[in-house]
Amino acid sequence: NAAADALLINFRSLVLTWVPDPAAGVARVQLDPPLAGVQFSPTVPLLAGECGDWRTQLKAQLTDPNRLSFAGGYPASCGERSWPLAYAEPASYNARALEGLWKEMGGRLGGQVRDGQVPAGLQPIFSLGSPPLAEVIRDINKYSNNVMAQQLFLTLSLQQKGLGTPAGSREVLGQWWRRRFGEADLPSLDNGSGLSRETRVSAQALTRLLQAAWAGGTMPELLSSLPLSGVDGTLRRLGKDNAAVQGAAHLKTGSLRDVTAVAGVVHGASGRRYTLVAMANHPNANALRPVIEALIAWTARDQNLP
């Protein structure tokens, strides 16, 4: 997973695409963006049979930052598929991407990329404004984009203190929480994203936050940013065979190896809205998913609920 960075080009990720060429008996491999110094085979053999777990069938070796290799093949029945990946050597990504893209456009480089502090007083030669916050949180929440969440978290202290740091943003967010909710149920945050073993928050705190958000002026923007059950984002597969769940809830998901959680709003058949929070911390936490689906369906029917 990519980490937050002031110069975060393309999330420091790459996308491999396989395009079958049945006449040649191969799938042609494309790399985007082109990374200087990264070698890869332009083709892999086509395989017969069902698509299935096509990534495993490629037998990919992706840990070498200078070479991407594939010892297997690609099922022809898969058609064109893409595989987004985090690059194995994040520290060199920016230099490789800039050189690769520049050369692809016909340019030449005579120097090299250098890391260091920007001297004071220099003026930017180029600037690009951020999309509106409503668009940013939609990308973060719909698809659980952790690096974007970390970047946004650091912006809190950057705007108030002039320097974006995890500690500074924790302080800013803590002050915001105390002004609205007091000391009770104060969350303990780490890096602002779901990729942390140190973050702590209670179900009660999340419920209070959701209730306050529902009553706030930006409720429509927040709610529409959350995945819709059985429809899109990280919840697109939830309840695909359960009509009571499809489109019944806007929920943010969270998962680690031994953690499963959701929090958001369920739309009841009666027209009422309910906050819903469910969390499990257990080696078998993934088993909570069917329970969550049943809980959403039960809440959406809202029969015999107070």
Image (tube, rainbow, N blue to C red):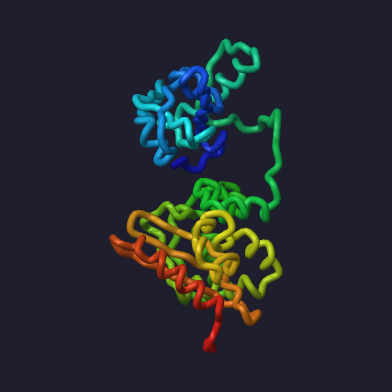
Q: Position of residue 259 (x, y in %)?
A: 37, 60
Locate residue 211 relative to residue 202 in the image: left or right.
right
Q: Position of residue 96 (x, y in %)?
A: 51, 23
* Picture mark count: 0
In the displayed structure, 225 sits above or below 306; it is above
Residue at 55% x, 28% y is 32
In the displayed structure, 111 sits above or below 232; it is above
Locate residue 25 relative to residue 224 in the image: left or right.
left
Q: Nearer the viewer, residue 49 or 140?
A: 49
Q: Quadrant of residue 127?
A: top right
Q: Position of residue 173 (x, y in %)?
A: 54, 62
Q: Quadrant of the N terminus?
A: top left
Q: Is residue 291 visible?
A: yes
Q: Quadrant of the C terminus?
A: bottom right
In the displayed structure, 254 sits above or below 20; it is below
Locate residue 188 relative to residue 248 in the image: left or right.
left
Q: Quadrant of residue 255?
A: bottom left
Residue at 61% x, 11% y is 108
Residue at 41% x, 60% y is 199
In the displayed structure, 261 sits above or below 297; it is above
Q: Nearer the viewer, residue 261 or 211?
A: 261
Residue at 33% x, 58% y is 258
Q: Nearer the viewer, residue 243 or 121?
A: 243
Identity of the residue furthest to the left in this view: 283
Q: Is residue 95 visible?
A: no
Q: Position of residue 121 (x, y in %)?
A: 66, 32
